[in-house]
Amino acid sequence: MSEESFLEQQQKLIGLCSDADKLAFALKQYLGVTFFRYVKSYPTNEKYIICNNEGWLKAYFAEKFYNNELADYRKHPIGSKGVHIHHPCTRDHPACNFWRANSEIGDYTCFIYFFVKYKDYFESYNFGLKGDAHQTNDYFFNNQHLYKHFFLYFKSRGKDLLQQAEEAKFKVDDTGEYNLQDNWLLGINESMTKIVMQEMPLLEVYLDDEFVNVPLSLKEARSLKYFLEGYSMQESAEKLDISDSVHIETLTSVMEKLHVKSYNDLRSLCYQKDIALKLSFLNKDIR
């Protein structure tokens, strides 16, 4: 892409700021969100950005931050996802330096960052707020469901905006192999996670509300988890490395503990009482 063409792409994306700001109206009006941006990055070293702040986006291009930011397909392993809250810091890292230097233009003192990498693309959302650390942290954590609802709203109502941005995507420099140890967004690695899990072995899984004194054995919890995730009896048994009959017997034991008569009632109860959500955290490393 020529320099002239790249400048044209930049202007197209900067021209979308007003429409992006309109899409973020409810978050601005009721949650105090002052800054919003969305980045989509591809394995081809191409990406595009949608932002509600024209001045900040101009700085993003002028300083070539698109080459250094962590919102980049190449800088995350496939399957990585997370939530990051960023407050002004003194760390000498390109990402920290840019966000700190342009906080006044962007009209934020901190922001929350949602990101996920799929096989064919990486995407992320930033929402900025103004306020002290205690206030903004609570506002972010206790309203995550509204931000996640915005993801659905943005993809639906912002469809035309996304298409225009897609047509203006641009190439970024290939910085070569990226040292994932420099990406603190990812938390600890998989092998260390397994060690931590093994240091905290479970004996059983206790439920909540009226079932607060009802413990499920790990065997019961695992069978119930796969059942709630929609696997057939045979598929669940294979994943658990048990026979179909043992899996069915285990679910029957769970039904007796929860006082339900059918699989449909079991499924409904588990979603109503957030049992399904509790068991979603039960992974293969938990023993």
Image (cartoon, rainbow, N blue to C red):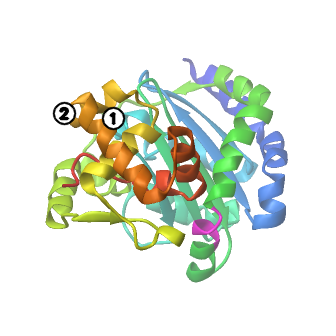
Few, some or many residues within 10 Å of mark 2 (<14, 14–19, 20+): few
**Range drawn in magenta:** 139-143
Q: Residue at x 78, y 36 (%)?
A: 16
Q: Residue at x 75, y 41 (%)?
A: 153
From the image, tell me which residue sits under label 2: 241
Three-letter amino acid code at the position of disc 1: Thr
Residue 175 marker: 1
**Residue at disc 1, secondary structure:** loop
Q: Relative to the observer, which residue lies in front, 265 or 190? A: 265
Q: Relative to the observer, which residue lies in front, 213 or 283? A: 213
Q: Is residue 66 magenta?
A: no
Numbered disc total: 2
Could you tell which of marks 1 and 2 lies nearer the N-terminus?
1
Image check: 158 left or right of 41? right
**Quadrant occupied by the C terminus:** bottom left
* Res 280 visible: no
Name the dominant secondary structure of the magenta segment: helix
**Quadrant occupied by the N terminus:** top right
* Res 35 visible: yes
- Give the residue at the far top of this rendering: 1
